[in-house]
Amino acid sequence: MSVEVDLLLQEAKESIEAAQNYRSELQQRLHGLNQARKQVPPSAHTSCQARETLRRHFTELQAAATRLLTERLAALLAEVDAIEADSVKPLDDCQSLIEHGVGQADELLREGEAALRCGLGEKEDKLGSFTKKAMHIQLDSLPEVPALVDVPSISAQLDDSLLGLLRERVSRHGSVSSHPPVQIEELQERPGSILVRWCKVDEDFAAADYRLQYRRSGSGGSQYEDAFIGRDCEFLVLHLDPHTDYLFKVCARGEGRTEWSPWSIPQTGFTTLAAHEWCPGTEGYILSSRRNIALRNDASQSRCPVLYSNAPTYFCGQTLTFKITAAGQTDRRDSLGVCVDCQGGAESLQRDQAVCISTNGAVFVNGKEMTNQLPAIMVGSAVTFDMEVVNLFPISNNNLSEGASFKLRVTIGSGNREVVFDWLVDQAVDCLSFGCSFVHSGWKVLVF
């Protein structure tokens, strides 16, 4: 009997434990559901916002259509009035001329009949006066009456197909959806920027273009502004302040459509990484106000100074990009790259403890040119550097012993090609500097 009791007790304990785990899981799901409810605006639950938007839009559309039809009717009636006025005036003039002639003929007839009835003594004078008057009136001259075919016949021509076309367009105008066809998938922080990725969630929606907008979060008067419109599904939003929240949203435009889809649910993102900047005060270079664009303006052939970053802000695992927005004459001594330290007086990054690419596409590692070569750099080129730590050996108290090496796996991309190699440096580094050098003026580089 005691064995059965023990079994029952054990089974009860297991059931209690399972019930506790079940309740805990349900509570976690309820918490997630409450978070989801907070994310969705309350108006979306009752569809009040959608109804109000539809009513307002179609009310405005009805008013606009009524106004356009009224204006068109007024214009056509004005045309009828103008044609009528131009057509009636010649007829009125002709009628006045005929009526005047009829009056003259009546008066002449009365005088002629009176001359015939008068006595012989005055008949000669009256007949003479009558004859002169008849000659003056020119009884053989008649005014020309317009032919019926020459008189305008006003009519209205109306295209009955307009109503059919209007019915077809109205039947396809607007749509109602329960979910936006596209949503933001990932917000990835970058130095002074955020890489935004999005994806379609409605497989039946054929997207022709995407539209990304953003604004600073928590700013009541801040308006969303366009960051990108195009076919890509990711975009790097630049010029963002570190440790500041920004809201991002995306929508899409279907194939053959002009209107945009509903916006995705806004997502909040921020970057903790300071923006890459060029070092100010370097001879031969002019910097933009944000110091992320450098222009080589000194064509001196005697010295080719290296412009370094303002600080070692490049970390392994990130992508460093140099965008060429203007180009000058190429020279094999030119360089764009990454270095362990900023050596003052250096004329190129083609040196020890640096990796770089020349404007002719040659790749240099610690001052030695590699066999592999990338396409030559020109206007519009984007050169990318990606690095990851391979290993560190040997290590003693986090410091490299004498003769040790720190190996980084480096990928340099330009155009549609890339080179991958291992870079040995003589000290452990957690951040690196970048730089550029150009012999000739005219080169303009954006770094991000």
Image: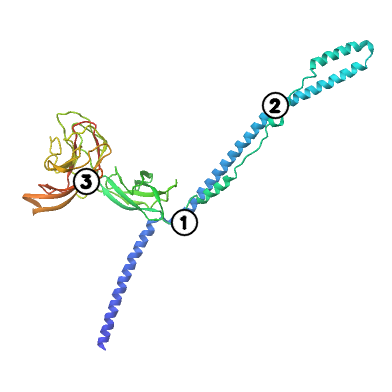
Using the numbered discs, state the Cα–Cα distance from disc 3 to disc 1 in whole angstroms. Answer: 51 Å
Cβ atoms under marks 3 and 2 closer than 8 Å: no
* In the foreground, 186 or 272: 186
Rendering coords of residue 170 (x, y %): 53, 49
Q: Earlier in the sequence, mark 3 or mark 1?
A: 1
Residue located beneath label 3 in the image: 418
Give, as a three-letter code, the residue at label 1.
Ser
Q: Which of the two discs, 2 and 1, sits closer to the camera?
A: 2
* In the foreground, 151 or 207: 151
Q: Earlier in the sequence, mark 2 or mark 1?
A: 1
Which of the 4 image quadrants contains residue 397?
bottom left
Give, as a three-letter code, the residue at label 3.
Glu
Q: Which of the two discs, 3 and 1, sits closer to the camera?
A: 3
Q: Which of the two discs, 3 and 2, sits closer to the camera?
A: 3
Residue located beneath label 1 in the image: 47
* In the foreground, 187 or 141: 141
Using the numbered discs, state the Cα–Cα distance from disc 3 to disc 2 in whole angstroms. Answer: 86 Å
Give, as a three-letter code, the residue at label 2.
Pro
The residue tagged with tag 3: helix, strand or loop? strand
Rendering coords of residue 235 (x, y %): 31, 46
The residue tagged with tag 1: helix, strand or loop? loop
Residue located beneath label 2 in the image: 90
Which of the 4 image quadrants contains residue 359?
top left
Using a 10 Å C-alpha cutoff, classify the residue at mark 2 as few (fewer than 14 neighbours), some (14 to 19) or many (20 or more): some
